[in-house]
Amino acid sequence: MAERTLATLDSSIISRLPSSSQILFHAKTQQNLTFSSLATSLGRSEVAIAALFYGQATAFPEDIKTLSSLLKLEESILKSELEQGFPDRGRAGPMPPTEPLIYRLYEIVQNYGYAYKAVLNEKFGDGIMSAISFSTKVEKEVDEQGTWAVITLRGKWLPFTRF
Amino acid sequence: MAERTLATLDSSIISRLPSSSQILFHAKTQQNLTFSSLATSLGRSEVAIAALFYGQATAFPEDIKTLSSLLKLEESILKSELEQGFPDRGRAGPMPPTEPLIYRLYEIVQNYGYAYKAVLNEKFGDGIMSAISFSTKVEKEVDEQGTWAVITLRGKWLPFTRF
Amino acid sequence: MAERTLATLDSSIISRLPSSSQILFHAKTQQNLTFSSLATSLGRSEVAIAALFYGQATAFPEDIKTLSSLLKLEESILKSELEQGFPDRGRAGPMPPTEPLIYRLYEIVQNYGYAYKAVLNEKFGDGIMSAISFSTKVEKEVDEQGTWAVITLRGKWLPFTRF
Amino acid sequence: MAERTLATLDSSIISRLPSSSQILFHAKTQQNLTFSSLATSLGRSEVAIAALFYGQATAFPEDIKTLSSLLKLEESILKSELEQGFPDRGRAGPMPPTEPLIYRLYEIVQNYGYAYKAVLNEKFGDGIMSAISFSTKVEKEVDEQGTWAVITLRGKWLPFTRF
Amino acid sequence: MAERTLATLDSSIISRLPSSSQILFHAKTQQNLTFSSLATSLGRSEVAIAALFYGQATAFPEDIKTLSSLLKLEESILKSELEQGFPDRGRAGPMPPTEPLIYRLYEIVQNYGYAYKAVLNEKFGDGIMSAISFSTKVEKEVDEQGTWAVITLRGKWLPFTRF
Amino acid sequence: MAERTLATLDSSIISRLPSSSQILFHAKTQQNLTFSSLATSLGRSEVAIAALFYGQATAFPEDIKTLSSLLKLEESILKSELEQGFPDRGRAGPMPPTEPLIYRLYEIVQNYGYAYKAVLNEKFGDGIMSAISFSTKVEKEVDEQGTWAVITLRGKWLPFTRF
Amino acid sequence: MAERTLATLDSSIISRLPSSSQILFHAKTQQNLTFSSLATSLGRSEVAIAALFYGQATAFPEDIKTLSSLLKLEESILKSELEQGFPDRGRAGPMPPTEPLIYRLYEIVQNYGYAYKAVLNEKFGDGIMSAISFSTKVEKEVDEQGTWAVITLRGKWLPFTRF
Amino acid sequence: MAERTLATLDSSIISRLPSSSQILFHAKTQQNLTFSSLATSLGRSEVAIAALFYGQATAFPEDIKTLSSLLKLEESILKSELEQGFPDRGRAGPMPPTEPLIYRLYEIVQNYGYAYKAVLNEKFGDGIMSAISFSTKVEKEVDEQGTWAVITLRGKWLPFTRF
Amino acid sequence: MAERTLATLDSSIISRLPSSSQILFHAKTQQNLTFSSLATSLGRSEVAIAALFYGQATAFPEDIKTLSSLLKLEESILKSELEQGFPDRGRAGPMPPTEPLIYRLYEIVQNYGYAYKAVLNEKFGDGIMSAISFSTKVEKEVDEQGTWAVITLRGKWLPFTRF
Amino acid sequence: MAERTLATLDSSIISRLPSSSQILFHAKTQQNLTFSSLATSLGRSEVAIAALFYGQATAFPEDIKTLSSLLKLEESILKSELEQGFPDRGRAGPMPPTEPLIYRLYEIVQNYGYAYKAVLNEKFGDGIMSAISFSTKVEKEVDEQGTWAVITLRGKWLPFTRF
């Protein structure tokens, strides 16, 4: 399955995404670019770029210029798609997720939610880990036991205000 | 708020947990032990220990001996609570989570689910990151911008079988 | 991100809104107008104007005239869109909200709902704060701790009738 | 209805709250104290105090001392109830709320959610108003049109990180 | 707001209604007719006529003739739309209703449901008030306290059969 | 079925109601009183009294005195149950209602919701019929076609504020 | 499996039923009576008697006397359980039913619902088959193809009123 | 309402049905045929024919020939619509049904589900009444009390296997 | 983890199971018996025996005798628990399952549901695989790639009746 | 019903599937091929091929070549449809399934879920049967009692990691 290396846009979810998603994914397939190569060029995380493609994150001005050149899309078109407006997040897929890959992440929250809370509370006090002032990345590790995916979530700790 | 450093068991969720949860949390409070100190003694991740307390993970024989000594609980009692049976996972809290800290983790899955899938598929092919052959940890980082929580998820990559 | 100052209409929610929403948002983008400038011209709250654009509030006759001139839309077209009919409210987005910004407001109701009720009941007796005989506004405050959003909700107190 | 000025704890929701809620509400009724008088003594918002009573907020060490004296509860008992553990928020009532007073707040989010988002995005950029680094208060206004409840929500603005 | 006196059909709910709804509402707007004037001409309740427009009630042969003349629609067209088939009721809007006006009616059922049942059972025995052998009307009352809407529901009492 | 004239409290819903409900219903059965006779003595609507019994409405001071005498309950007990606190409404039964009698009322909202909205909007403008500044009653009519239940809903009209 | 001929009450659903259910089922088991024999003695349908046991139907005065004698329960006890109050129907089991036998009935409604509606509308006009003015019975048929259960539903036809 | 005798296809449910449904219903209206007359010609139950029209049942080869001639549809077209593929059942309408006629059937399952189970278990043992090896019919009865709809459900009894 | 070989009953699900479940699981733990050894003695499938313990299957007379002897429980007690009544199936756990092991089975239905249907329809025609006239077993296979669980489902094919 | 041997694609679910589904099913019907014959040619399980057609599984390069030749579809078209992208699984049908055939599989999980867990845990320890490293097949058996469908699920056993 050596050739299958590009994520594309499933037509059945287009109606839940902004119009930019179709344009971006189409150009990415045309240029045969992975999120990894795009991320390297943009100096950002692959997950952020994929989120941008799914309309779940913002393109910054410098991103638009680079994307336009990498994706061979006219900058004016990309600008009109990406420069105005603010992402309407969270509607790309159903919750609970039906997709097995995404469900596993959901299951981690379901099973370890209270455990994370207890550990975070003991380490940081009463508060939350921000999902906004936040970054995430995906890495691959290979050892004698097999191949491992490593996802890192890094968020600012916000204590509850006393008021 | 210097004194508040121990996570305890909210009485309103006891009915959703195995009987061991009450015994373990009570002893932990009595002995004034954090998950961090327990984890160090057991040579395991804090999240795993907290999950064990919430009935979401298994105690291994060596864990029971150590826990018995740390928590000042008779080994025979701990054994009868923890040695037989298998965790009935996933019922500790509601989904979507109403707790703000746990909700933020859920929101990360909701917002970045497809982005993770696209990046993982491009990096690893068609498959999933296992939530079973899996480990996780929580770390604290402090920099000039503030305090950060870092959660690492590490799971074996399982490709879909061709059949 | 200096240029990103205009909220636009995400194409994926158009089917849940009245036809006027598309016309209004399109003209707003064309004229490069913020809700703030529109609100100032109309002498109304920004939130009310945005609600009007999303089909969640009524345009008054004086509003239509002003909007027509600000948005460079023929008054007859605006009239036919906005003068007849009554808003069919509450269907713009899902509940619980998946959008992180809107979810935070939902979370405030979820966490503080009973607290608001207890305080309002003690202050006013048995009744409700009207969401109809109601106004709301958004303000920005900056202090040494950062930037703050301040939302004010002001509703008539309605006591339950004795019957 | 002059006498009815104290919010009490409905026995039918006790099972969803921590054990401290019953103790606190009972003492409050015994001492005939309103949230307003408690808040004044503690130098905090009434809503925060009510949230603390419902197990949705943390008592700070200085609060426990004052509460003990106002509520005529032994400090050691209050300490054991309030000093350890971290609130497990968000489970006090159902969502959508069935209580008319709380529903009105939910309805405001439902009707004006996108309008708030559009106005906040235009004023602050891509981000959210924090519900954690957050305070809120309730005020009463009386004018010739009647009596008004005014709820103020004030949260830190958190921009989405570029990563 | 003197001009706003006509209810129209929100385009976003058309897909949930029969094709006749669009034709009827369009003609009503063209002829500038209220449900009140239509009801008077047809000798029926305004609510019944509005229900007919929303595809929730049947047109009787005598109604079609009169509607055709009032709405300036060819009788043959109206006949083909309204004379065959039977209403597929109950799908016009979501339940619980998100529309504030409709929600208030839902809330009355939610709050007073058991009270109605207790009173009706004591007055009539074990049975129900029919919603089929049923009529309803809306009236306006004005007194010194303000303007009042009065909705009357009148249904046949059906006792449970002993079998 | 001549003897069955008293509504009683089904034990399976007690956990959803305040403690006063059991006391009131028990005394009503002991004294063999209908809601009709209680309402006459109190000068209130039967529905209001039944709602009070189900914890969905407030007892006024004058009501407590009369109820105490009619139900042969010590006034001090009734006072402690009914004088403090505020009803936590809307949780007595499930929605959608499973009880056939209550479901019929729900069905009326489901089928005629938009029709009521259209008629009310045309008669009163953009607003709602209050369910708070509200009264309701149940009447019995008998004619040659059978027995009819007539429910009247009367609520203040509240126009949406222009802000 | 010759001995298994008595339906009993599963203890895990007792909390959803009135207190009479336990008493009736217990006595039925003690007296080793089937619903069939009870129904014959009472001159009613087996389904009605079973529904009465599950608190979904009313006992008539003549039923109480007979039941008392058949079940060897003091008439005064049965009277106090069954003579007052009105069934609070529809909460015995979850919907959709998880029980395979009950699910099959649900599935018939799911699959054939529109077909029944079309056939009934063509046969009777616009209306419903009453589930209140209604009786039902279960019969057993055996032929060369096997054993068949036959359920008959008989309800009064109620046409929608023209109003 | 003498003319209204034909059930037609509500355009708002077409998207949930197979393409054959539109063709069949359209032809039925053109030929002015009731399900009753179709059923007589085909020697099948009216409910089965209506289910076939709604895509909830299979047409047998002999049915296609007869339907083609009755509906004046070319046999080749009918064949291509009805001869291949297998019904994808159960998605024609929402559950719980919002349509009052279909809801009544659902309510019968909700209210009498456990009663049917108890009676069937006592009569037949541990098993279910099949909804697959199953037939059903609708009949009309008229007596001095009015008009009655009688629905018969007849399914094979399947005992649970001992394994 | 050599010692952990016995499945026990999680106390938090007891309220959803019949009273026999506790007795059976307790005795099984006392006698240190696996489902495998019980199944061998009873000549039945392990899954059937486990289902019997969870109240999801029937004990046959011969099973009771053997179970009594294996579990060292008096036959009369077992008889009174298991000989009367019929299982009330399907309520042991939530759906969708939150338990990871059970969720995987649910996911197989979710992902392969239509594929199974297409293959079964092509192989057998229009019908279903019975879950009643049905047996199932679990086997273990070990090969060079690891350890495999093999679940076999075997159900009678039931064709839809032509009626 | 000899002719009905091909599963086709119901047009009402197309919007939930990738565009390849329509192309594949259409060609399969044109070439009159069953999943059985396709599977034999491809050397894979029928269920896997059907899953591939429903967009729930991946085509491997060798599959595309063979499918192209069997389905008489240009290889370049099939490649562009099937070679890029990764299946977005789990959205083909609703859960709980409304289709009777698929529901029976769901019911097996609902009824026997805990039994499978108990047996698997005792046989394999704490872990899950993988649904990813997984294969499945359907077989037909005929004996004197009738025709049987046999579904085999075979998944790798994954023990929970100790971390």
Image: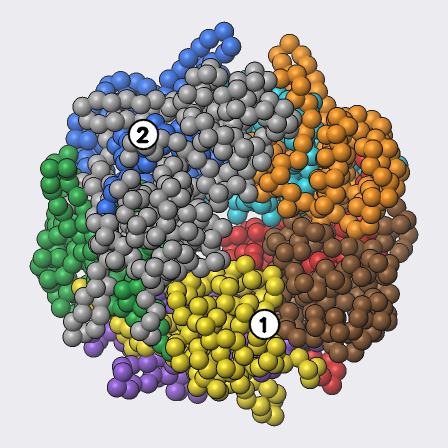
Chain colours: B green, D blue, E orange, F cyan, G red, H brown, I purple, J yellow
Residue at image coords 49%, 78%:
J68
Dot 1 falls on which chain? Answer: J
Q: Which image quadrant is residue F7 in?
A: top right
Answer with the quarter of the image where residue J132 lies. bottom left
Q: Identify the image quadrant of residue E131.
A: top right
In-front residue for pair G146/I28: G146
Give the number of marks.
2
Q: Chain of mark 2?
A: D
Q: What number is the disc on residue D124? A: 2
Residue I55 on image: x %, y % = 46, 69
| Nearer mark to the viewer, of 1 and 2 | 1
Q: Residues within 10 Å of mark 1 (few under 14, many from 20)?
A: some
Residue type, numbered disc 2 = Phe
Label 1 to label 2: alpha-carbon separation: 52 Å
1 and 2 marks in contact (CB < 8 Å): no
**Around disc 2, counting alpha carbons within 10 Å, would you say few (fewer than 14), some (14 to 19), or many (20 or more)?**
some
- Same chain letter for marks 1 and 2: no
SS class, disc 1: helix
Q: Position of residue E159 (x, y in %)?
A: 75, 45
Q: Which mark is residue J26?
A: 1
Q: Is residue G152 above or below residue I141?
A: above
Query: Could you tell me which residue is drawn at 82 percent across and 47 percent down?
Result: E80
